[in-house]
Image (cartoon, rainbow, N blue to C red):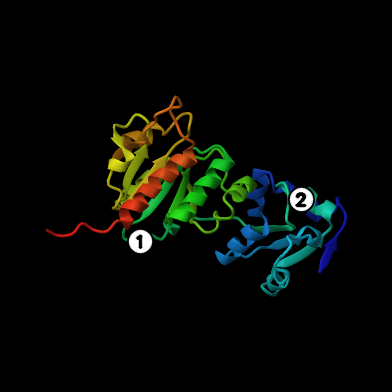
Amino acid sequence: MTVITSLQNPRVKQVVKLRDRRERERERCLLVEGQAELELALASGVRPQTVFVCPELFAPAPDRDLPARLQQAGTEVIEVTRPVFEKMAYREGPDGWLAVVPSLQRRLSDLTLSSCPLLLVAEAVEKPGNLGALLRSADAAGVEGVIVCDPGTDVGNPNVIRSSKGTLFSVPVVEASSAETLAWLRQHQIMVAAATPQATLVYTQADWRGPVAVVVGTEKEGLSPLWLEAADVAVRIPMLGRVNSLNVATAATLLIYEAVRQRMAPAPADN
């Protein structure tokens, strides 16, 4: 196994460059830090190009067979010293695992839909932490796909991967324009449910049992006129305090879990 000890090593400098969006897009790769995140990526079929390991930082009970398994699968595994790893790491308290993986290249046409899909559409999300939290909720609720429209942050941002706990790889995620996404939803006859404080219908009163896309916007601006005008139904979450909006990830979680609740409810008995 190759061992890197120099902070000036070109491989180390290249990993640091991958924090920049333009460099990630040029190289068509992402950074995945953390053993749990790497394991989830592997379980989702992702095959890393390179994995950097620092045994000195490993958790008390690491999977010490993982480097060998990665090498057998054709992944380059490189051991680095602690100072080198800490230079490459992008989160506090690194655990000694950092992978370079191919970027996700999904299109709307790549999404596999059931007969009654539940989708989440997020328009113009700006903060990586919010996008990561949206993905965690989508994974937990069994959402079939997350469509990120006109985002302010790229899906491959390392902080999206970190805050999503790796669920970026377990939930099908697509980046597309709002116009393209709306046309695709219409083509597949999927109801557009827009979340907006101006709606009169409370979200628990809507029928979420059919094919539906939950659409949420930014906390400051909300959804664009395109979505508000095209929505089949507009819903609101009751606000009883002085703040007129919830965190976008919190709002999306309430909506998609209401859909899950309705779908899991037993069918009414025939009279």
Q: Quadrant of residue 22?
A: top right
| Viewer can see residue 232 | no
Q: Quadrant of residue 72?
A: bottom right
Whether pointer 1 and pointer 2 mark residues with C-beta atoms closer than 8 Å, the reply is: no
Q: Position of residue 62 (x, y in %)?
A: 71, 65
Q: Which mark is residue 114?
A: 1
Residue found farthest to the left: 271
Q: Quadrant of residue 252?
A: top left
| Viewer can see residue 128 | yes
Q: Position of residue 159 (x, y in %)?
A: 63, 45
Q: Position of residue 76 (x, y in %)?
A: 73, 66
- Mark 1 / mark 2, whichever is N-terminal: 2
Tell me which residue sits at (68%, 47%) in the image. Answer: 23
Residue found farthest to the bottom: 72
Q: Secondary structure at mark 2?
A: helix
Q: Secondary structure at mark 1?
A: loop
Tell me which residue sits at (47%, 34%) in the image. Answer: 218
Q: Position of residue 233 (x, y in %)?
A: 29, 40
Observer-nearest of 258 and 11: 258
Observer-nearest of 21 and 39: 39
Tell me which residue sits at (33%, 57%) in the image. Answer: 264
In this picture, residue 76 sits left or right of residue 165? right
Q: Which mark is residue 149?
A: none
What's the residue type where badge 1 is placed?
A: Ser
Give the CA separation, mark 1 to mark 2: 41 Å
Q: Residues within 10 Å of mark 1 (few under 14, many from 20)?
A: few
What's the residue type where badge 2 is placed?
A: Met
**Residue at the spot of label 2:** 88
